Amino acid sequence: DAKTTQPPSMDCAEGRAANLPCNHSTISGNEYVYWYRQIHSQGPQYIIHGLKNNETNEMASLIITEDRKSSTLILPHATLRDTAVYYCIVRAHDAGNMLTFGGGTRLMVKP
Amino acid sequence: GAGVSQTPSNKVTEKGKYVELRCDPISGHTALYWYRQSLGQGPEFLIYFQGTGAADDSGLPNDRFFAVRPEGSVSTLKIQRTERGDSAVYLCASSSSGLVTDTQYFGPGTRLTVL
């Protein structure tokens, strides 16, 4: 899988949008971008994934640049419960079932 | 319905001892995964079961680690001759059918401490 680069930590004010960046400059054409998050003392939780089009679900939006070398996860109205480590994962659907996690971004939502 | 459960939540053992960690996947899920998470790092893949068989065990670090899933439901991760470096949170996940596109649902993990 292509490697990803994320900032180690970010702060966000409660109620504001949280924009979490991820660089994946060596991504291949068949690799998807996945986002998971891990709240303290819990297992990771799936958020969203996409290939090249922007995606939105009830949790977040995923914006992928046209060249697919980077993406941004957007939490539109962050709450204190969104405080977690967010992992950006690049994976091909024909490269095995395992998830390969990097270091992630520790998002701290502050009141 | 119930999510993935793992027991015990915490396990403290002494170097050289044998430990077993249990995972109860979501009912009906055929795929089961084990990951290990060291402090401050992301989870690392250990092994993947499809039904009763280990479809991919490429992440097991050495032959002290072994996992079984005899009836295609509950799985047990077994660690022999534990070492201090085995201290970590062991996470289990399950997915409905093992398709790579299926969402993996994680349990809360078992925190293993080897003294």
Image (tube, coloured by chain):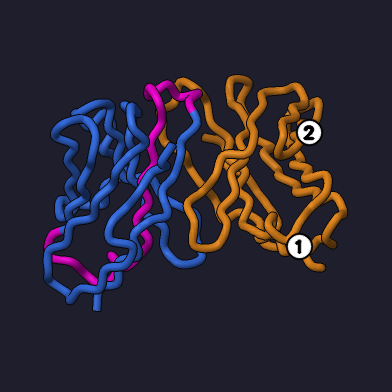
Chain colours: A orange, B blue
Q: Does the magenta stretch include residue B84?
A: yes
Can you tell which quarter of the image residue A109 is in? bottom right
Q: Is residue B16 left or right of residue B43?
A: left
The chain carrying label 2 is A
Amino acid beneath label 2: Ile
Q: Residue at x 56, y 53 (%)?
A: A38
Q: Which residue is drawn at 28% across and 27% down?
A: B50
* Rendered position, B115 above or below B104: below
The magenta region covers: B80-102
User: Could you tell which of marks 1 and 2 lies nearer the N-terminus?
Assistant: 2
Determine the secondary structure under disc 1.
strand
Q: Is residue A104 left or right of residue B90?
A: right
* Rendered position, A1 above or below B9: above
Amino acid beneath label 1: Val
> Where is mark 2, residue-wise?
A63
Spot occupied by residue B108 in the image (x, y as percentages of width and height): 42, 54
Give neighbour class at mark 1: few <14, some 14-19, many 20+ (Cα, 10 Å): many
> Where is mark 1, residue-wise?
A109
- What mark, if any, has residue A22 been given in the picture? none
Q: Which residue lies furthest to the bottom in this view?
A: B115
Spot occupied by residue A1 in the image (x, y as percentages of width and height): 51, 34
Spot occupied by residue B91 in the image (x, y as percentages of width and height): 38, 51
Determine the secondary structure under disc 2.
strand
